[in-house]
């Protein structure tokens, strides 16, 4: 399915392929920098703790590479996607290095928008490209070529404050159901602490990241095998209604303003007792400066009809084909995703802050194994247990869990997320939201029929 090279039809992706390929063509040599040979690399990245650690440590790279300056442009997730998509698709060349997800990498690689990193990485034996976890390496490849490398990989898990649950005589299973989680959330919900925090902020990578996995474990999905949209199904309605009821009864106030960072803060500050979200959050909850370090418990993502419901995702570093600093950009990408970088994070910032889910060797470092003992084993367990080819009850014609890996999904997901967010905020009914989403999703699926 990812081999479909139809012209992108939505948003900024509707730019003609002729314009894109012309703008993206570049020489293999570096053309950027000033007359003195100095190079400034512009790196666009997402606003989260792991990326902020990289920004903090960039001086280590700059010191080792005199004349090279790395300029970080940190954005919220939705803003990052819009800015990077517009830049890379048009070949404008504003960024030398971009942070993109597993959703974008194979599609953009197929379109010629990214530098093929395969040979550069294989030629560097110290980099050891084979050390990258195979599932994460695979989702960043197209036709056997690697177009991005993971800064960190993740699945999703349930995180809960053990002290709060213990005080309420609640025992959380390692493999809970969503009903068990809803019951537990009710028991620990108070005026000062919500029983659970869940994403509600509109966006295919915000609200729909966890909600799509809820839909899948309830038996629904975006499309059937013939690319017929199935958003108006009974399974979708049951899952979305459950999600809203959970938030209404035990969730945070104003859920549509919450995504990853807001829920992370709520758990750290004792304003929420539980959270089902990205497994990478565990490393932040267990960081040395975290108020809840040592107080957290971790379980598999809750299920209803499936054995697992975690997602598989990675935030990756890629080099746009339009960069004028190709060699320098690749060199920084190699540094920031290397074994040595993982050790540097541990030594300079803390071993629990080492980027998880990217390299096999990370899980063999004694200091990391000790610092990440609470969450590292379950992260690996869930990442290897999920099935991106069929995460739900029924077969699907794409590979991906919390997203549909077609160009149209970014726009489809964003529009539908706004409709569901309106339902969460009591501005519309579930039937109206899903009916409108069904029409939007079908337009996206129509391009792939036949």
Image: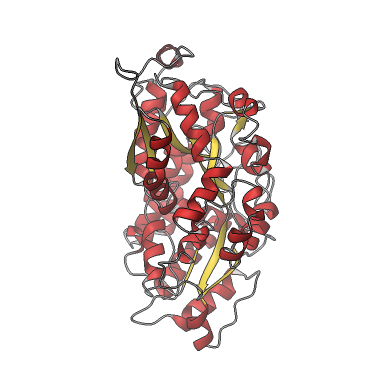
**Which residue corresponds to the image point at 68% horizontal and 37% vertical from the top-left?**
130
Image quarter in which the N terminus is found: top right
**Which residue corresponds to the image point at 65% horizontal and 57% vertical from the top-left?**
382
Residue 314 versus residue 278 in the image, above or below: above
Q: Which color scheme does this rendered protein use?
A: secondary structure
Instruction: Give the image location of residue 366, x and y in percent.
Output: 63, 59
Q: Which of 320 and 11 lies nearest the eye of the viewer?
A: 320
Residue 422 versus residue 186 in the image, above or below: above
Left/right placement of residue 222 relative to residue 255 reads: right
Q: Which quarter of the figure has residue 261? A: bottom left
Left/right placement of residue 31 relative to residue 143 reads: left
Number of marks in the image?
Answer: 0
Residue positioned most to the left: 35
Q: Which quarter of the figure has residue 125? A: top right
Instruction: Give the image location of residue 30, x and y in percent.
Output: 42, 17
Q: Which quarter of the figure has residue 299? A: bottom right
**Which residue corresponds to the image point at 58% horizontal and 73% vertical from the top-left?**
179
Left/right placement of residue 396 relative to residue 209 reads: right
Instruction: Give the image location of residue 111, x and y in percent.
Output: 52, 21
The reply to whether residue 388 is visible in this rendering is: yes
Image quarter in which the C terminus is found: top right
Residue 139 versus residue 29 in the image, above or below: below
**Which residue corresponds to the image point at 41% horizontal and 21% vertical from the top-left?**
325
The reply to whether residue 234 is visible in this rendering is: no
Q: Which of 214 and 427 lies nearest the eye of the viewer?
A: 214
Instruction: Give the image location of residue 144, x and y in percent.
Output: 67, 27
Q: Which of 427 and 347 lies nearest the eye of the viewer?
A: 347
């Amino acid at each position: 399915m990812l081999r479909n090279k139809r012209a992108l039809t939505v948003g900024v992706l509707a730019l003609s392929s002729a314009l894109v390929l012309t703008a993206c063509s570049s020489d293999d040599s570096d053309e950027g920098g000033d007359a003195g040979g100095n190079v400034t690399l512009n790196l666009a990245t997402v606003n989260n703790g792991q990326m902020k650690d990289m920004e903090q440590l960039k001086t280590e790279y700059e010191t080792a590479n005199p004349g090279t300056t790395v300029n970080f442009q940190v954005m919220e997730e939705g803003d990052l996607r819009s800015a990077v998509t517009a830049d890379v698709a048009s070949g404008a060349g504003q960024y030398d290095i971009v942070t993109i997800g597993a959703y974008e990498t194979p599609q953009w690689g197929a379109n010629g928008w990214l530098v093929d990193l395969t040979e550069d990485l294989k030629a560097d034996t110290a980099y050891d490209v084979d050390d990258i976890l195979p599932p994460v390496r695979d989702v960043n490849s197209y036709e056997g070529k690697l177009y991005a490398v993971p800064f960190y990989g993740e699945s999703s898990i349930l995180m809960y404050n053990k002290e709060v649950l213990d005080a309420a005589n609640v025992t959380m299973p390692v493999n809970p159901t969503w009903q068990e989680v809803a019951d537990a959330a009710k028991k620990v919900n108070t005026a000062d602490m919500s029983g659970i925090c869940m994403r509600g902020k509109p966006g295919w990578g915000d609200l729909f990241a966890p909600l799509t996995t809820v839909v899948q474990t309830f038996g629904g999905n975006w499309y059937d095998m013939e690319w017929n949209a199935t958003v108006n199904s009974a399974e979708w309605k049951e899952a979305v209604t459950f999600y809203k009821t959970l938030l209404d009864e035990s969730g945070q106030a104003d859920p549509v303003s919450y995504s990853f960072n807001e829920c992370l803060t709520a758990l750290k500050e004792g304003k929420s007792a539980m959270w089902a979200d990205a497994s990478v959050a565990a490393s932040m909850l267990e960081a040395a400066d975290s108020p809840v370090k040592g107080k957290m418990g971790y379980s598999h993502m809750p299920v209803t009809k499936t054995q697992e419901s975690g997602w598989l995702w990675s935030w990756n570093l890629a080099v746009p084909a339009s960069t004028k600093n190709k060699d320098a950009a690749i060199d920084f990408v190699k540094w920031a995703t290397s074994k040595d970088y993982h050790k540097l994070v541990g030594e300079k910032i803390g071993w629990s802050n080492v980027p998880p889910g990217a390299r096999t060797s990370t899980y063999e470092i004694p200091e990391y194994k000790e610092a990440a003992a609470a969450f590292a084993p379950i992260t690996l367990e869930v990442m290897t247990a999920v099935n991106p080819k069929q995460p739900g009850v029924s077969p699907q014609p794409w590979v991906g869990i919390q997203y549909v890996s077609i160009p149209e999904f970014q726009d489809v997901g964003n529009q539908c997320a706004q409709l569901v967010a309106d339902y969460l905020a009591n501005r519309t009914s579930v039937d109206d939201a899903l009916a409108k989403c069904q029409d939007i999703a079908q337009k996206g699926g129509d391009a792939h029929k036949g």
